[in-house]
Image (cartoon, rainbow, N blue to C red):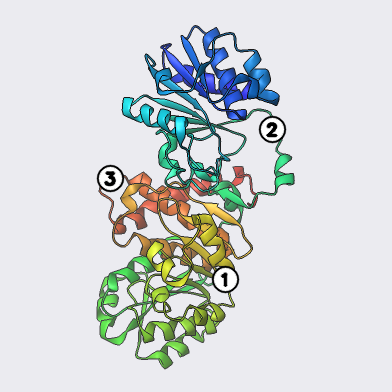
Amino acid sequence: METAGRKVADAVSRRWPPQPIVVLCGPGNNGGDGFVAARVLAERGWPVRLALLGSVSGLRGDAAQAAARWPGSVEALAPAALDGAGLVVDGIFGAGLARPVDGIAGAVIEAIGERRLPVVAIDVPSGIDGASGEVRGIAPLAAVTVTFFRKKPGHLLLPGRGYCGETVLEQIGIPDSVLDRIAPDAVENAPDWWLGAFPQPSLETHKYHRGHALVAGGEVMTGAARLAARAAARLGAGLVTVAAPEAAFPIYAAALTGVIVHPIADIEGFQGFLADKRRNAALIGPGAGVGDETRARTLAILGAGKRAVLDADALTSFAEDPGTLFSAIRSPCVMTPHAGEFSRLFDAAGDKPERARRAARQSGAVVLLKGADTVIAAPDGRVAVNANAPPQLATAGSGDVLAGIVLGLLAQDMDPFAAAAAAAWIHGAAASRFGLGLVAEDLIDAVVPVLQDLLAHTTDAIVGTP
């Protein structure tokens, strides 16, 4: 607690000059951290006031000891405690809050917002559920959140992430061996745990070693499949083929170079095309159209045992009978739904990691539930939360590129959970690198410097699993 409180004081001192500051403390360990931060700031010459929810006599353990070392007065938590303050340290509630904030604490948080005071939050902004990112009634918008040991899901999931501001992770002496005891099954998505499994061509590698990816093309919205095919090729699939409806074959053939285009007349022709075992991974959904034909092609891909990516229309086509889809999944499979597509197949109750875990377990597929806080879940319960996606990814076709990235990695035999996580991270990193003005086509070339950076750092990666 002493170290945690000092880290909070350090975060304040690094970002603001000394000025009147109020430290708001709650009855638990977060409040104890606040008492330490207040004392350290006062020792550094800051004019500090401290307000407590409850009484000093009600504090226990380390929090009581921290309060005993505070040399100043203790005010009752109330909006009046904010008078004259230029800055607020929020230590009222921590990450384990499981009930709505109300009463005097809610009134104080509301007053912080009305006065537009900058906030430094301890662990999480009070009112944010650390497990889900949900707002429990009300929460302040923090400029900085200082948390300890490891981030909580609420620092990454929306809406909580939007309340945290800059999240600063500090180590306070908790040993890593604690992770063995608590056995976490969630990870912040980052290259350090999947980079060791990322496909790297060797001198002996030829194109067939790198897999042959198949994209099922649609007849009307041809751009979606073209984007996905180009993305799969860019991610390293040795060959990529678009299986195009005969009527649309000239469009695909004229638009794609470096990608094979094969005309397909009917479902029998598609099934025959799948019989070639060298075509080891397939994507269906982007621009496929919703209906019986897409259902039949999806089941044909799964029946042929291909490593599969199911997106968009391939998912919606089973909205009336998801059980048929789930029972057909017997080979490595990644689903990439957005929230609307997800709700057509799965129960949408619960927080985002819970929903994704339940869906992965039910379907037997890795589920990549898209959004600014994309969650990737495996059937065994592992979860990765991806938080590097910039707002400019909200553009038509970006999901098709993401599906193609997953396909390119699956074609190279990357583990489906790691492939989905890597694809989400690369997708976000490429968009961030490109910046404003992004359209989906830009992503395909923007992944190149991201891949080059990954390759450069492969030997330095610390490889683990969530």
Asked if residue 201 shows in the view, the reply is no
Q: Distance between the residues labelled 3 and 2?
A: 40 Å
Residue beneath the point at 32% across and 73% down: 287
Per the image, the residue denoted by label 3 is 436
Looking at the picture, tell me which residue is in the foreground, 201 or 130: 130
Sequence-wise, the earlier of marks 1 and 2 is 2
Per the image, the residue denoted by label 2 is 174
Q: Which of marks 1 and 2 is in front?
A: 1
Per the image, the residue denoted by label 1 is 362
Q: Which mark is on residue 420?
A: none
Name the element at disc 3.
loop
Task: Please provide percent x and percent y for residue 216.
Answer: 39, 78
Residue beneath the point at 58% across and 49% down: 187
Q: In this view, does 220 lie to the left or right of 203?
A: left
Task: Please provide percent x and percent y for residue 88.
Answer: 44, 22
Q: In this view, does 297 lie to the left or right of 114?
A: right
How would you rate the neighbour count of disc 3 (Cα within 10 Å): few for under 14, some for 14-19, many for 20 or more?
Answer: few
Looking at the picture, tell me which residue is in the foreground, 302 or 49: 49
How would you rate the neighbour count of disc 2 (Cα within 10 Å): few for under 14, some for 14-19, many for 20 or more?
Answer: few
Q: In this view, does 51 lie above or below 346?
A: above
Task: Please provide percent x and percent y for residue 457.
Answer: 55, 44
Q: Distance between the residues labelled 1 and 3?
A: 39 Å
Contact between marks 1 and 2 (CB within 8 A): the answer is: no
Amino acid under label 1? Gln
Q: Which of marks 3 and 2 is in front?
A: 2
Q: In this view, does 283 lie above or below 9?
A: below
Q: Distance between the residues labelled 1 and 2?
A: 36 Å
Q: Quadrant of the N terminus?
A: top right
Q: Furthest residue to the bottom?
A: 268
- Find residue 253 and report its image quarter: bottom left
- Find residue 357 and report its image quarter: bottom right
